[in-house]
Amino acid sequence: MTYPLWVPKWFRHGWSLPWSEVKELKPRTTGQGGLVYYFLSQEGKAYLLPMRVAGFAKLVREVQAKTGIDTTNVIPLSQPWMYLILLVFTLLLLLVDAWTVTTAIALN
């Protein structure tokens, strides 16, 4: 995986794990009730599977192809429709803000 070019180099940190070292994929529940996955190495170290990446389905297919681990139940943490809902509510709040400002100006 790589970062987009606009991400500063000093911000880019991560990890690497050879495919041959991946032992299994373990699900873990988050504090908010979501589900994240960790790669477990042969040594027992855990590495967080990136969930918010473009092409997540392709990444999961590659994990299955390279490791033989069944990834059919692995889904992204946030579905694209969730971001659409957030966009709609953001636009609604901007409209309410604009209406409030124009009403306040008109009353003066």
Image: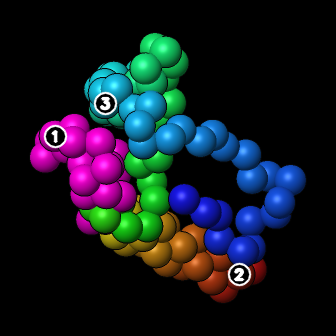
The structure residue drawn at horizontal position 21% and vertical position 42%, both measured from the top left corner, is 68
Q: Left or right: 9 with respect to 20?
A: right
Q: Nearer the viewer, residue 52 or 16?
A: 16
Q: Left or right: 77 with respect to 17?
A: left
| For residue 31, above or below residue 17 | above
Give, as a three-letter code, the residue at label 1: Asp
The structure residue drawn at horizontal position 50% and vertical position 30%, both measured from the top left corner, is 47
Label 1–label 3 contact, CB within 8 A: no
Per the rendered image, the range of residues in magenta is 59-82
- The residue labelled by disc 2 is 105
Of the two numbered discs 3 and 2 on the same chain, state the one appearing first in sequence.
Answer: 3
| For residue 8, above or below residue 21 | below
- The residue labelled by disc 1 is 70
Quadrant where the N terminus sits is bottom right
Of the two numbered discs 1 and 3 on the same chain, state the one appearing first in sequence.
Answer: 3
**41 is within the stretch colored magenta:** no
Q: Which mark is residue 25?
A: 3
